[in-house]
Structures are given as C-alpha cells and as structure tokens.
Amino acid sequence: MEKITEEQKLSKKQKPFLIRLFFYLILAAIFFLLGYSLFYAVKFRDFVSSGTGQKIQNQTVATMPDQTNILLLGSDNDQKFTGNPLTQTMMIVHIDFAKKEIDMFSIPRDLWVKMPGKDLYGKIDQASEFKGIPSAVDVVEQTFGIHIDNYAWVGLLGFIKSIDTLGGVNLDVLHPVLDNQYPTDINSSNLYGYQRLDIQAGMQHMSGEEALKYVRSRHEDLLGDFGRTERQRQLLLTLKNTLFQSKTSLLNIPQIFDDLKGQIKTDVSPLDVVEVGTFYFENQKSIKIKQFTLSPPTYSTDGNSTDGQSIVIGDATNSAKLVESIFGKKAGETTLSSLSSVKEIQQ
C-alpha cells in the first residue's frame, strides 16, 4: 500500500477549505448584488413617490408590453413663474419591444394647436399653463392621436445636477453656438438678465450647466428651434451611451435619483425602468434608434398668428404620413384632422 505523506494529508485538508471559501465568496457576491438591487428598487420607489405624490406598490411580475410611449418634458426655469411653466422641450420616445426599435419624435414648441378642453388656439408649449403636466399630455394626445403611457418632466436644476453626477458629458459640437441673449436665470441674482454665449465647434467635455447652455440656446441658430431640438436629441443619445456604457455605470443611478428629487415629476414605475433597462442591455447591439421632427419645409412652415405671434404651422398631410409610419393609422388620421382644422392663423 502506498504511503501517504504528511504533506499530502495537509493538501487534502486544504482542498475542502478552499472549496468552501470559494463557495462563500460566490454567496457573498450574490447577496451583495441582491442587496444592491433591493437598495436600487427602494430608492427608485421612494423617488417616484416623492415626484408624483403616489405610493408605488412592490411589484414582482413583469408583463412586457409590445410598445410604449413616454412623453419627455423639459420646462423653462420655473423659479421665474408663479404658475405652471412652459414646456420648452416635448419629445415622445416610442419603444417597440418586438421590433427592437426606439423612435424619438420631437414636437416643435411653437407648433400651433388647439388647446386642451378649450376653443382656443396657441403654441403647444403653452398647454401646460392650464393644468400643468396633465394639460401637456392631453394636447399631445388630442393633436396626434398618440396614447401616452408615461411621462417624465425635468426642471433645469435637476438637469444640471444629473449630468454633474455622471461626471459631465463629452459632446461633439458640430458648429459654433452663439447667442447674445442667453438668459442668466441659473446661479444668478438677475433672473431676467442676458449674457453672451459662445460655444466653439469640436469635441468638448461639458459640466451640467455647460451642457444646459448648449441644448437650451436658440436665438442665433440658423435653424432656430429646430436646431436646438437636434442638439437636445444629440445630448440624450450621448447620455444614454454614458449611463449604459457598462452595468457598473448603473451604480450612479441612486445618486441621480437623489439629485433629481424635487426637480422631476414622473409616473414611471420601478418595474417600467427594469423592463426598459433589461430590454436595452439584452438588445443594445441590434436596437435601431431613429429620430424624427416636424421640421420645415416638408412637415411645417413658419408663420404668424392673428395676434402677431411667431408660430410653426404643421403641414397636415405630410405630418400625418410621418406620424402614421411611427404610431399607426389611427394616429395619422387624428394628426391630419387636428392640423387641418387649426384657426387664428394669418393668411
């Protein structure tokens, strides 16, 4: 019989210990991930509750829809207003889970439409002045026939803080952005003053406040508000790439939630975020992202209202075809009807 040495006996004793140690490390990692996931879910639940005033119930079973429409709203600086601020940005993010497509449909803030529930006409960004976010949602639904499943409204300070939490953002400025009337309503004692803005072309690393200036300026842009819309979508896509560049980058999300408290209003649930996040990570190499806006001359023209306002007049026929291609036949028919019937426009 082969003699077993003391060294071999020691080795046999060490192997079970090493196996147990490895097993415990795996368990510890699993518990850490579960713990962080719970922390994340609780943070998001509390965040949503504070932003909407609604209690979010714990959800355990997800039913992935075929499609969803999320209305993104960006306000003017509400520190300057006693009522509901205008919505300077209106964008519908249409997610088709089956086709693995994301469509970003931007609505011009000066688009002339019928106001919700009233026999009045005005710029679509004025709808929120009636009853806040519900009025903005109503006017989008009645103008385009698009059902809005969820909304997210963000104020200017929350915008700045969230980008700073991510460490800033790298943006490729395609052409200089010059503005001699950029408002000094952020971090200034003069909420109604103006300053000169000069952002040169080229790749730049921007802080939250610098990024806000880049996407908010519009006075000297040759494309006017449509040029600003393009910059806003560029920033959103860049932020998406920054936030989802790796799963570890999601560790910033709880801090972003803290930064946005009081600066965002949304009815998005934690389950919705988990669904969209999972959808993106599982399909990020195959997802198609398309961008649309009602830009001139095909989908709109510049004009004036009878009371002298500079407005955007939607081309009913072409806009209806575009909306139908994204949101379906019913949406196209509603768009054709609503944009054909607008009144109070100078001929």
Image: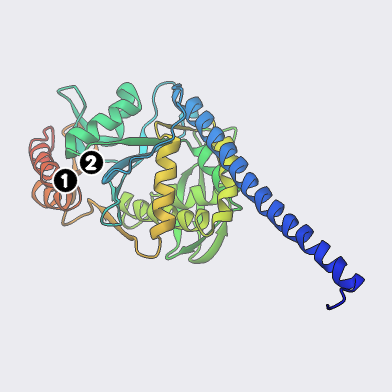
Q: Position of residue 254 (x, y in %)?
A: 58, 40
Q: Which amino acid does label 2 sit on?
A: Leu
Q: In which quarter of the image is residue 137?
A: top left
| Residue 313 point in image, percent of width and height | 17, 44
Residue at (42, 66) in percent of width and height: 174
At horizontal 42% and vertical 34% (from top left) the residue drawn is 269
| Residue 254 seen anywhere in this rendered image of the structure | yes
Describe residue 272's horizontal placement relative to residue 291 as left or right: right
Distance from Cα at disc 2 to Cα at disc 1: 7 Å
Query: Label 1 amino acid?
Result: Gly
Q: Tag 2, which secondary structure?
A: loop
Label disc, if present, on residue 314 of the rendered structure: 1
Whether residue 16 sits left or right of residue 48 in the image: it is right
Report if the CB atoms under discs 2 and 1 are less than 8 Å apart. Answer: yes
Return the residue at label 2.
Answer: 111
Above-or-below relation of 284 to 123 = below
